[in-house]
Image (spheres, rainbow, N blue to C red):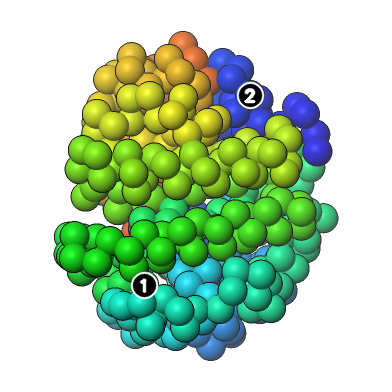
Amino acid sequence: MAADKTILKALAGETQPTPPIWMMRQAGRYLPEYKATRAEAGDFLSLCYNSDLATEVTLQPIRRYGFDAAILFADILLLPQALGADLWFVTGEGPRLSTITDQRGLDALKPVEDIHETLNPIYQTVRNLTTALPRETTLIGFAGAPWTVATYMIAGRGTPDQGPAHALKDENKAVFEGLLNRITEGTIEYLSAQIEAGAEVVKLFDSWAGSLRGADFDKYATAPAKRIISELKTRHPGIPVIAFPREAGDKYIGFHAKTGADCVAIDDSVSAEWAAEHVQKDGCVQGNLASSHMVTGGDALVRETKRIVKAFGKGPHIFNLGHGITPDADPDNVQRMIDAVRGG
Ligand code: 1CP
């Protein structure tokens, strides 16, 4: 591992004159080369489990833009599948899973040590990338945080308000907490295997953390992240972790210290100036640019990019979007953003 990689320096707490940059969902449908490889694979899940093609799509945005980090191409829903849930994608709609709503469903899941059988091709993709990436590029592995993964396993699909997961939490806490624990233990094994295969950083995506309120946020977002991060750091001393409790609002404050995360990723519902004052004081921050700028471009894109760089300029910072880039984004706008960050 090259200690001079800019992403690793930021994660170690260094303030750099130009922040390193990568982008959530940087391999994806806004890129014509991604669409071509996905067509070759046949469907999204076949692409995830084909190590050669998954390596290829991970490399595409690095080749095109020279980002400072590559993120493993996979999905947060592969872990539920490895635990025994049925998973498929409906074109134009999104993921579908078999649902877990009672003790029987929970008992039917596979033991955590069995996940690797399904996930071995993902570890192979990581191994491929350790030799295929340019030496200055950092490789990020990832998983979904337990609450976010549970929302899909309970509802069987993406939900606007995570209603079914909240209902199970309120009506059958034993099953809900049993499921969260199983996902937590599975996530530790999954991320640990990614690190052993060569991931240099791991990121926990809690995309639906914002719907957890008050004590629920502490119990079901903060506590599982803390358990996962402390176990990973015990097994792999020094491994940097990025946590993304999306739409946490005030709960972003103190999230580094409460979980042990080296970096907290921030969505676009709070201002960079606010996050610099209240969150960056505790460690590295990442994110905040609204993904819509990748669609609309223009002066606003450059202005917002420079404002975020300036707001976070006095501390450790990794430039990124507040959420994933969307399929309707213009690839030229990505280059404009990079030029604005790197001083173009
Ligand atoms: O048809 C396609 O090509 C599928 C689109 C797609 C892609 C490109 C999906 C389906 N997943 C991915 C890859 C992916 N997903 C990556 C790696 C690629 C990269 O970042 O470059 C990562 C890190 C994820 C993470 C992910 N998957 C999250 C967390 C981040 C976030 O966006 O909030 C979530 C919630 C998922 C679930 C998922 N997978 C795919 C879709 C359409 C969804 C969202 C479903 C919903 O609307 O609830």
Q: Position of residue 92 (x, y in %)?
A: 30, 80
Neighbour tally class for label 2: few under 14, some 14-19, many 20 plus, Cα within 10 Å:
some
For this rendering, which residue is in front, 205 or 132?
205
Q: Is residue 308 visible?
A: yes
Secondary element type, mark 2: loop
Q: In which quarter of the image is residue 311?
A: top left
Q: Can residue 210 be seen in this view?
A: no
Q: Where is residue 333 in the image (x, y as percent from the top left)?
A: 39, 47
Secondary element type, mark 1: helix
Above or below for 169 versus 273: below
Residue at the location (18% across, 65% down)? 171
Kindly identify the amino acid type of the residue bearing the numbered disc 1: Met
Name the image quarter holding the N terminus: top right
Measured Cα–Cα span from mark 2 to mark 1: 35 Å
User: Which mark is on residue 12?
Assistant: 2
Residue at the location (80% across, 34% down)? 2
Quadrant of the picture in which ligand 1 is shown? bottom left
